[in-house]
Amino acid sequence: MNRKDLTNSNSFRRFAAERQGGPGVPLAMMLLTLLMLSVQAAIAAEEVGRGPVEDNIWVYHLTPEARGGRAYKLVYVVPVPIDIYWGFKTDFDNDFLTRNKYIAEHRFIFRNANSVVTGNRYTSGPDGLYRWQTTVMAERRRLEYVLLNPAEMKQKFHYGCIQLAAVNEGTLVTQVAYFDFFGVSLWAAYPWAGGMKDFLVYTARWEQDMVVALKDRYSTAGHLP
């Protein structure tokens, strides 16, 4: 007696597809699609601008450069005069950066005129020393930085600038960065803890608190480069 193989029937195929969440689409793909839709909506909301994400902290997505990747602009106000904040920001051989929960190690490597090289090891990402070169433009109160070993740190490129301006509340800080690495779009768009916005808001808030705690250290002209 010949028995028909029910697993080859159209009804069985439809049943199997429905159990997977749709015709030939695994459940994981559906969840990933929903995640991408939510983070894309978050990007769109940031691009049109909705005011500060925290008091005196703004995060914007910028158009990436020609090579791809992502870009951001972080704007925040620190409640100290510009000269004090400049001294804090240009103290490259310091003992306070490791109080930031994302920085496991900080090293001052060398300085040549207005070019400074430092190294940071972070608590997340590739385990290695990120070597940063910072160009100090004291008269303009501007810093330009670039990652010197992107391939070693699993990145394609990473660079940016920090511009200071005096305001009534203290110092307005504008940081712009362009960068690319595997998974960068998801990290930049992820709107919850662990994403780019969460990292940047924490960093700005940490600086606002830290520079107030250390302002007496940088209150004299001797600390200014």
Image (spheres, grey):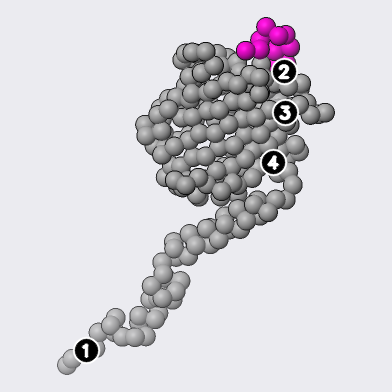
Q: Which mark is residue 165?
A: 3
Q: Nearer the viewer, mark 4 or mark 3?
A: 3
How packed mark 3 is, by other alpha carbons closer than 10 Å (few <14, some 14-19, many 20 or more), is some
Q: Which residues are magenta?
A: 214-225
Mark 1 lies on residue: 3
From mark 4 to mark 2, how far is it between C-alphas? 22 Å
Q: Which mark is residue 11?
A: none
Q: Which mark is residue 58?
A: 4
**Can the viewer see residue 192?**
no
- The answer to whether the residues at label 2 and label 3 have Cβ atoms under 8 Å apart is no
SS at mark 4?
strand
* Quadrant hosting residue 75: top right
Q: Give the mark, 1 or 2, whose residue is nearer the N terminus.
A: 1
* x and y percentages locating residue 117 in the rendered image: 48, 19
**Can the viewer see residue 67?**
yes
Mark 2 lies on residue: 83
Nearest the viewer among 132 and 206 is 132
Nearest the viewer among 5 and 112 is 112
* x and y percentages locating residue 87 in the rendered image: 66, 16
Would you say 53 lies left or right of 109 here? Answer: right
